[in-house]
Each structure stands twice: as structure tokens, then as C-alpha cells.
């Protein structure tokens, strides 16, 4: 069966099928953000085990908690301050999803005191679902309460911070940035496509295809989120890649259709030719991108797996739309595609002679081109050796977030480390009990060990709260049951010791502290044989996160490289083409890493992308995400170019002539597609979410470097130097003899006529 012709002839049924699919799936998309998880999770990690243990074995009311910061209020140790705290904790404590509150009223801990501020630790019920989902109703309570308190305490503010509020605000910021980026990008995309095609109607078609891919992918992700937890990053990835890849694939199909129309074919035959020639390229490109996303599924981080799911969904829709629905739309449109033409001087398609001239330069002097383009690329790539994949240091949270403002208030009080506390669980052997003398002494010794660390400001445990008393009935009566559940498990065989770092302790010091604690001899510290320590809390989670990424990165790279080699080897039936493509992709990725170092770590040009100062490092997930996405995207342009070279060779062109022809016909398409991708990625640099700013910058740089220096200079030069070895072991034509520039000199030194079509007619 002639599949391309079948697709075009049955375009009515195909369009009806897509319409039905859109009616069913698209309506779920607008509610996607309400179905997504916000907090990152490291499956099977020690920090996750501690969190689960506190919620189940301990039944702690503070297994998950938020911090309510009360600013511009009387001191908590004054009578008005105590009265205010009782009113606040009474109102908040009755709110849905709150398990318990803890403040200066509970024990008089001076930790809670500031000159004009205090805070309340609010336990969140894990049985109510994700902790961040409780933040909106809690904010509604405190907003109403603040309005009630304003007449008596002018200027008072009640703001939430902590892991759950920060996660909620980051989700809202992420969603806002994604929506804003889409609307910023669309006019620029239409303008660039108009310049690329020279007509307004032709420019609208790829954008419409990309937007439909996004709408379908968002709806599909929302349906999937009902059965599998997905992270908020899935929405950003779908928006980012849907605009980029969806438009790119449609651009290639439309370009092929217009070429066929120019060659004199009717609309149906032109659409069939577009599917036949562009379809294979798009499928191969989509497969290469999918390999990268599939590799991400192997990393036990929910946000990276969500990125993989979002990427796979949007790539699948982009490929299917470009190869099934779009050809039928083009067949219906026919000559209408050329309406709204721009002046000839503005049309990129009118300047193919530029690319042909450049192709002659590359064909004539490949070694010179390789050196001139390769040396700056290598210098940029060398900067990647300084890439710091620790958590970014400095104040990188969006300043307009309530949770960010509240955190800054905590830091001014000297209590910002409250949300960075280490939660160390001491597990006792069978027969021991934390409420009996031996277990009590073991917990006390662990507390003393932690308190001796110069980076620890204070330690809290049940013996500390008992203020030197020994375990017994008196202690049980004096300490409320909810506090005992916080620090001792229900079976008595585990005790919690909470260590608060000193204010200003950076992420690197905290991570080192976690790693040291995890290697300590628990029996030597506690005096109990077979005792075991487990370390949780936010610093421990950060360590687990880095370890999960770093531990799998080499495996992911190997999987992507091998998968890409296999896909391209089967697609081009060549050994050298896949090897060259992988090597050039690695160069593009390392160049993007080098640019990350120069801008985000060194601060060169940081203010141009809205970064007030260097952040000293990048998120641990950024390199692996960039590698997986860029490796697939870079393959797009390699496939676009090499497929045209192979097509020209099959048409009878020699190596040099085929290279010139390929650059002449694909140079404008590749650079236009890259410009669209750069704009799509670059738009995310305008947002306030630092992770997306880093990803947008790195991806934009990678695509720019790849589509210009790598694919238009370095890659073609290597193709020319390799000559017929490019196609070994499968010759493009059985028994073909080498035909070089001497055979078709007019294609190397001649004008800009359509040599490929003339070759087909011979």
C-alpha cells in the first residue's frame, strides 16, 4: 500500500478522527495545573523513607508542616503578643487540614521571638492529599484573619512559607510563565514563518499545528495525571516543546509541499510528495527525540519522569499531526497557501542562492571551514568542565511570591533555617524503647553529638524538651501526647532528633553535614548496639536528589547514545553518519553547558536575562534534562540535512554537488526552524522560575550553536571530507560510480536553479 497517497486520499476521515480526538481530549487541558504534584520526590530515597516513617510509625502532627510568619506584631513574649498568638493559633488550628500548631505559647522557646515578628509552625494532615493543596484554603483563613486584626494591629501581615507554600507558589509561577511565554512567542513565530515562507497563510499553518499539538498533549497529560502522579514541569515542557517541535515538523511538511507545487504538481500529488519525503525525516527525528525522553524515565525522580512523559506525549502528537492531518489540510488549501504574499526582498525563500554559495565554499575548503568554526566551539565547550551541579546559592526565589517574602522575614529574624532543619531518626534494636532509660540516654547522646557541630544552632528532641528530667510518669504528664508523637514512634523503637542549622549555612555545607551523618557509627554515638540513623529533611532531600541524578547520568548518556546510533544506523544504513551525528550532538550539548557556566555561574550577561547576580551553580537536574532534550533536538537538523544529501546522491549528484544542493534546499528551512525553536525556548528566560530560566537559556543556546555553527559549517565540512565513506556499508545506488563536481559542475559553480528536480527528470 502506498501509505502517503492513502493518507492524502482519506484526509476527510483522518480530519474527522482528529476532530473527535480533540473534542474528547482538549477540554481536560485547562485544569491540568490542579492535577499536578509540585514537590519533587526521590523514589526509594532515605529522605523519603524518613518522611513516610514520621507520618506512619510516629503519627506525628508535624510530619508535614508549613510556617506562618506574623510580621508587624507585638513581641510574642508580651501580654499583647501572647493574646495575638492565641487568637491566631486558635483560628488557624481549626482550619481544614491542620493537625496542630506550635508557637512561643508552647514552651516559651525564644526561637520564635523577633523584635516585630514571630512565627507559628502549622502541621498539615497528609491524609488530606498533597500538602501544597492545603495552602489556598489556609491563605483564605489568614487573609480574613489579617483583615480582622488590622484595626488593632495596623500593618500586620500573615504570610506562609515552608516547603508546601514554596511549592505551591512555584507551581503558580511556573503556570503563569508558561502561559505568558506562549503569548509572547506566537507573534514572533508568525513573523518568522511569514519571512520564511513569504506568505501569511503559509505562516499560520505550522503555528496552528503546534498549538493543536500543545492542546492535545495538555489534555492527554491531564487524563494521565488521574492515574499516574505528574509533576508541574510537565506543563512547561509541553508548552516549550510543542511550540518548538510541533512548528518545526509542520514547517518541514509545508516546505516540501510548496517545493512540489513549484515543480508543477497538483495539490493532492504535492501533499503526497510532502508526506513521502518529509514523513520519513519527521518520523526518524521524532524517534531520536523520543530516545532522549525515554532515557529520563530511568531516573527515580518524579519531576524528571514527568518531563519524559510530557516530552513523549507532545512529540508523538507533533509527529502524527505533521504526517497525517497536515498533508490533508495542504491538499485542501492548494494555491490558497500562497495568499498574503510579502515583498520579495523580505522572503527567506528568495535567498537560496546565499546558501548555495555557502555550500560551494564548504565543498571547496572543508578543512578551513572546519577549523574556523570548530575552534571557537571547542573553546566554549571547554568551559563546561567548571559546571557546578550543586543547588544554586543566593536568593533565586521569585520576589513576588508570598512564600518568598515570608522566608525573607524569617531570615531577618535569624530563623530562616527553620525550613532547612535536619530530621534525624534514631532506630533502636528490638527490645529497646526510646521512653525507657537506655533509649532515652541514646537519644540524649545523639542530641549532644549533633549540638557539637559548629554548623548546628540548636537541637530538639524529647529529652531536650524534658529539660534534664529522666523518663517516667512525670515526663509523660508534662509533655503533651501530640509532642511525644512528634519525637517518639508509637512502638517506642524510633526517636526523632531535629537539628536546626545556623542561619546563613549554605547548601554545600548542609549537604556535607548530611553525608557525614549518614556515614557515622550510630552505635558509637548512641551507645546502643545495632542502632541505626536515618537522615531526612530538606537538606537530605537535596543530597538524595543530586545522588539520583549523578548516579544515573552516565547510564542515561550511554542509553541515549546507543539508541541514537541504532535509530540513525537503521534510518541511513550507514556507520559513519550516526557516529558523526552523535559526536556533533555531544559538542552542541557541552557548548550549552559552557554557556551556562559563563552566564549563570560567572555572571557574564546575567542581567540581560533578568538575573541580578550569579547563582554560583545550576540545579542538579538541569544538565541531564538539557542533555536528553538537546540530543534529540540536535538530531532534527542533522536528519534534515543528511536526508537531503542522501536524496541528492540517489538522484545522481556527486558528493560535493549533493552537499551544495542540500545546503541550498535545507539551509533556510533549518535556520528558520532553529529560529522558531530559539524563540520558544528563549521566552522561558523571561519568567521568574529560575529552573525554567536555566533550561530555556541552555536549550536556546544549544539550538543556536547546533543549527548555525555545527550543522551549517562543521557537519557539512565533515561530510565533504568523508566523501563516499559517509554511506558505507550500504551504497546509495547499487554499483554507482563516484560523481563529483566534475560531473555536474553547474551545480557547484552554476546558478541557483532547481538541480534536484532536473536530476530526477534525467
Image: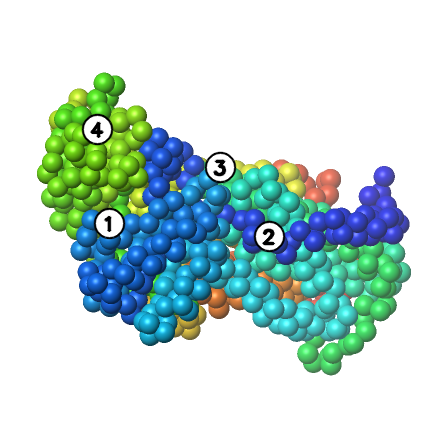
C-alpha distance separating marks 1 and 2: 41 Å
- On the image, the x and y values in percent for residue 624 come to 44, 47
> Between tags 4 and 1, which lies in front?
1
C-alpha distance separating marks 1 and 3: 46 Å
What residue is shown with label 4? 434
| Mark 1, other Cα within 10 Å: few <14 / some 14–19 / many ≥20 | few
Q: Position of 696 compared to 439: left or right?
A: right
What residue is shown with label 1? 106
Label 4 or label 1, whichever comes before in sequence order:
1
Judged from the image, the secondary structure of the residue bearing numbered disc 3 is: loop
Judged from the image, the secondary structure of the residue bearing numbered disc 1 is: loop
> Between tags 3 and 2, which lies in front?
2
What residue is shown with label 3? 298
> In the image, which disc is placed on residue 245?
none
> Between tags 1 and 3, which lies in front?
1
| Mark 3, other Cα within 10 Å: few <14 / some 14–19 / many ≥20 | some
Q: Nearer the viewer, residue 94 or 498?
A: 94
Judged from the image, the secondary structure of the residue bearing numbered disc 4 is: loop
Label 3 or label 2, whichever comes before in sequence order:
2
Q: Are marks 2 and 4 in contact (CB under 8 Å)?
A: no
Can see residue 141? yes
Judged from the image, the secondary structure of the residue bearing numbered disc 2 is: helix
Q: Nearer the viewer, residue 447 or 570?
A: 447
Q: Who's the residue at 86% across and 60% down the image? A: 332
Q: Are marks 3 and 2 in contact (CB under 8 Å)?
A: no
> In the image, which disc is placed on residue 32?
2
Label 2 or label 4, whichever comes before in sequence order:
2
Amino acid at each position: 500500500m502506498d501509505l502517503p497517497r492513502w493518507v492524502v486520499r482519506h484526509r476527510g476521515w483522518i480530519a474527522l478522527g482528529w476532530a473527535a480526538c480533540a473534542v474528547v481530549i482538549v477540554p481536560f487541558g485547562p485544569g491540568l495545573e490542579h492535577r499536578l504534584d509540585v514537590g519533587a520526590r526521590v523514589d526509594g530515597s532515605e529522605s523519603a523513607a524518613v518522611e513516610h516513617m514520621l507520618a506512619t510509625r510516629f503519627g506525628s502532627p508535624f510530619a508535614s508542616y508549613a510556617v506562618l510568619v506574623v510580621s508587624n506584631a507585638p513581641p510574642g513574649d508580651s501580654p499583647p503578643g501572647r493574646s495575638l498568638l492565641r487568637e491566631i493559633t486558635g483560628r488557624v488550628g481549626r482550619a481544614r487540614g491542620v493537625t496542630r500548631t506550635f508557637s512561643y505559647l508552647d514552651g516559651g522557646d525564644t526561637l520564635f521571638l523577633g523584635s516585630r515578628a514571630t512565627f507559628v509552625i502549622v502541621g498539615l494532615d497528609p491524609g488530606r492529599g498533597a500538602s501544597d493543596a492545603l495552602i489556598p484554603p489556609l491563605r483564605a483563613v489568614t487573609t480574613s484573619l489579617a483583615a480582622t486584626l488590622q484595626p488593632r494591629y495596623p500593618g500586620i501581615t500573615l504570610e506562609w512559607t515552608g516547603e508546601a507554600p514554596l511549592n505551591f507558589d512555584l507551581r503558580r509561577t511556573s503556570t503563569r510563565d508558561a502561559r505568558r511565554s506562549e503569548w509572547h512567542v506566537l507573534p514572533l513565530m508568525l513573523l518568522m514563518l511569514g519571512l520564511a515562507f513569504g506568505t501569511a497563510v503559509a505562516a499560520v499553518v505550522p503555528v496552528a499545528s503546534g498549538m493543536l499539538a500543545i492542546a492535545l498533549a495538555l489534555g492527554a497529560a491531564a487524563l494521565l495525571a488521574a492515574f499516574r502522579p505528574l509533576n508541574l514541569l510537565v506543563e512547561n515542557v509541553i508548552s516549550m516543546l510543542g511550540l518548538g517541535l510541533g512548528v518545526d515538523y509542520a514547517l518541514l511538511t509545508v516546505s516540501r509541499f510548496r517545493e512540489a507545487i513549484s515543480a508543477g504538481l497538483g495539490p493532492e500529488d504535492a501533499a503526497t510528495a510532502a508526506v513521502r519525503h518529509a514523513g520519513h525525516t519527521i518520523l526518524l527525528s521524532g524517534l531520536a527525540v523520543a530516545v532522549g525522553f525515554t532515557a529520563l524515565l530511568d531516573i527515580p525522580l518524579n519531576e524528571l519522569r514527568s518531563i519524559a512523559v510530557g516530552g513523549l506525549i507532545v512529540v508523538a502528537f507533533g509527529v502524527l499531526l505533521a504526517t497525517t492531518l497536515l498533508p490533508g489540510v495542504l491538499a485542501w488549501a492548494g494555491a490558497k497557501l500562497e495568499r498574503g504574499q510579502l515583498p520579495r526582498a523580505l522572503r527567506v525563500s528568495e535567498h537560496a542562492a546565499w546558501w548555495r554559495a555557502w555550500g560551494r565554499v564548504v565543498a571547496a575548503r572543508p578543512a578551513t571551514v572546519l577549523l574556523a568554526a570548530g575552534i571557537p566551539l571547542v573553546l566554549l565547550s571547554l568551559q563546561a568542565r567548571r559546571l557546578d551541579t550543586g543547588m544554586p546559592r543566593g536568593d533565586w526565589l521569585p520576589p513576588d511570591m508570598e512564600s518568598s517574602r515570608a522566608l525573607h522575614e524569617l531570615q531577618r529574624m535569624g530563623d530562616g533555617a527553620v525550613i532547612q532543619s535536619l530530621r534525624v531518626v534514631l532506630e533502636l534494636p528490638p527490645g529497646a524503647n526510646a521512653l525507657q532509660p537506655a533509649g532515652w540516654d541514646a537519644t540524649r547522646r545523639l542530641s549532644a553529638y549533633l549540638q557539637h557541630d559548629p554548623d548546628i544552632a540548636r537541637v530538639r528532641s524529647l529529652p531536650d524538651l524534658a529539660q534534664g528530667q529522666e523518663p517516667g510518669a512525670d515526663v509523660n504528664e508534662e509533655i503533651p501526647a501530640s509532642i511525644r508523637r512528634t519525637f517518639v514512634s508509637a512502638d517506642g523503637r524510633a526517636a526523632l532528633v531535629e537539628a536546626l542549622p545556623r542561619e546563613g549555612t549554605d547548601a554545600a555545607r548542609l549537604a556535607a553535614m548530611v553525608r557525614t551523618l549518614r556515614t557515622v557509627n550510630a552505635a558509637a554515638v548512641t551507645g546502643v548496639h545495632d542502632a541505626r540513623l536515618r537522615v531526612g529533611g530538606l537538606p537530605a532531600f537535596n543530597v538524595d536528589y543530586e545522588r539520583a541524578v549523578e548516579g544515573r547520568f552516565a547510564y542515561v548518556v550511554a542509553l541515549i547514545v546507543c539508541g541514537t546510533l541504532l535509530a540513525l544506523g537503521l534510518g541511513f544504513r550507514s556507520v559513519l553518519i550516526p557516529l558523526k551525528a552523535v559526536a556533533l550532538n555531544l559538542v552542541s550539548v557541552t557548548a550549552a553547558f559552557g554557556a551556562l557556566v559563563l552566564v549563570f555561574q560567572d555572571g557574564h550577561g546575567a542581567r540581560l536575562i533578568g538575573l541580578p547576580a550569579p547563582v554560583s551553580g545550576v540545579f542538579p537536574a538541569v544538565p541531564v534534562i538539557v542533555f536528553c532534550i538537546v540530543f534529540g533536538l540536535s538530531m532534527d537538523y542533522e536528519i534534515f540535512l543528511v536526508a537531503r544529501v542522501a536524496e541528492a546522491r540517489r538522484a545522481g549528484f556527486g558528493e560535493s554537488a549533493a552537499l551544495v544542493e542540500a545546503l541550498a534546499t535545507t539551509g533556510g528551512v533549518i535556520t528558520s526552524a532553529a529560529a522558531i525553536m530559539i524563540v520558544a525556548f528563549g521566552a522561558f528566560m523571561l519568567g521568574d522560575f529560575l529552573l525554567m530560566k536555566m533550561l530555556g537559556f541552555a536549550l536556546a543556546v544549544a539550538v543556536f550553536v547546533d543549527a548555525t555553527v555545527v550543522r551549517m559549517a562543521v557537519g557539512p565540512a565533515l561530510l565533504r571530507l568523508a566523501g563516499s565513506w559517509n554511506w558505507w556499508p550500504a551504497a546509495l545506488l547499487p554499483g554507482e560510480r563516484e560523481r563529483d563536481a566534475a560531473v555536474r559542475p553547474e551545480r557547484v559553480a552554476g546558478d541557483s536553479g532547481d538541480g534536484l528536480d532536473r536530476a530526477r527528470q534525467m
